[in-house]
Amino acid sequence: MKEKVLQLSGVFPSTQKILDETYEVHVPPEGEGQAEWLATHGGEFRAVVTSGHHGIAPAVADKLPQLAIVAINGVGYDRVDLDAMAARGVRVTNTPDVLSDDVADLAIALMLNVMRQLPASEQHVREGLWPAGSAPLARRASGRRYGIVGLGRIGQAIAKRLAGFGGSIAYTSQTPKESSWQFHADVQSLAAASEVLFVATASSAKTRGLIDRGVLEALGPQGVLVNIARGAIVDEDALVSAITERRIWGAGLDVFVNEPHVPEALRRSPYVALAPHVGSATSETRAAMGQLMLDNLAAFFAGRPLLTPVV
């Protein structure tokens, strides 16, 4: 008999195929009928599959009395109450490492898009404006002072790519790392020392609003912010003000506070490069994420050690 799995979010097609072949997969209804469905069927599930963006709401988790594992198809776990899961003895896994390269690649791409004004240059060509004159001058991206907020797997991958651009690299994290890069004890100090500030730290109650008005003021009118972590880490109202009042030069953003809704001021600004939360959105990485999620599920049901446990 197949184990029952409750699926709360979509996965890559090849992952879905294996998931359906291996387990008895159930997707709860959306809207008003969900609570009633969970009240009837919630006790049947020991395992939940979800994404980092979706997580699992406390109201859903409370209706799963046999819950024993939440397998996240993604690296983020800020939408899972880890303390509550730990108190219940529920294991939580995610899919780190396999997406670090793609997210770091996108961080560099966003920096280049902002500083070299590539979207505007492309529009200049597509709209047939080139014969009438050249596009406005942009800014050099290499040889800058780069700062990285959070030197975990993704932060280190960004730093390795930046090494090829020349310039200097500094970072802040909970503790200094063994590296040749300069450590700053706080984000505001790092911002003041940086021309391009990359946000690559995990989202948590502690980091919510970490990039606030003071940090943006420290980054200054020539500074560029790149965020590929989570939208909530940046005070979005403060960022909008800093962009519209030209207190920072620009921003490259893949994540937002109220996704998929993006403030109009950011959408309209020529100094902001935007992406719709696609840091891990390559077929290769999505397949690898799905496989790691499946491997964690298989290990759990077989009683083996989990590959990438969070709690």
Image: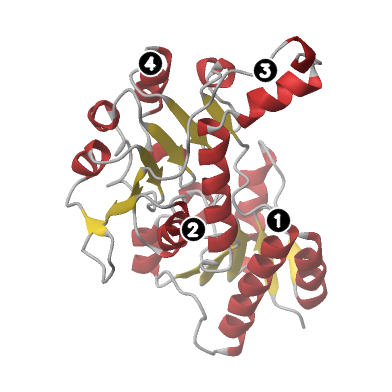
Q: Is residue 33 left or right of residue 306?
A: right
Q: Estimate the spatial distance between the alpha carbons at disc 1 and disc 3, rounded to whole Å.
A: 34 Å
Color scheme of the displayed model? secondary structure
Q: Disc 4, disc 3: CB below 8 Å?
A: no
Q: Which residue is mark 1?
A: 282
* Quarter of the C terminus within the rendering: bottom left
What is the three-letter code of the residue carrying label 1? Answer: Thr
User: What residue is shown at x 36% (from left), y 41% (from top)?
Assistant: 197
User: What residue is shown at x 21% (from left), y 38% (from top)?
Assistant: 188
* Earlier residue among tags 3 and 2: 3
User: What residue is shown at x 58% (from left), y 35% (from top)?
Assistant: 113
Q: Is residue 289 above or below residue 276?
A: below
Tell me the element at label 4.
Answer: loop
Image quadrant where residue 136 sits: top right
Numbered badge on residue 246: 4
Residue at far top of view: 132
* Earlier residue among tags 1 and 4: 4
What is the three-letter code of the residue carrying label 3? Answer: Ser
Other-residue count near label 1 (Cα within 10 Å), few / some / many at <14 / 14–19 / ≥20: few
Q: Disc 1, disc 2: CB below 8 Å?
A: no
Q: Estimate the spatial distance between the alpha carbons at disc 4 and disc 3, rounded to whole Å.
A: 24 Å
What is the three-letter code of the residue carrying label 2? Answer: Arg
**Residue 50 drawn at (x, y percent):** 61, 58
**Residue 272 drawn at (x, y percent):** 52, 26
Numbered badge on residue 134: 3
Other-residue count near label 4 (Cα within 10 Å), few / some / many at <14 / 14–19 / ≥20: some
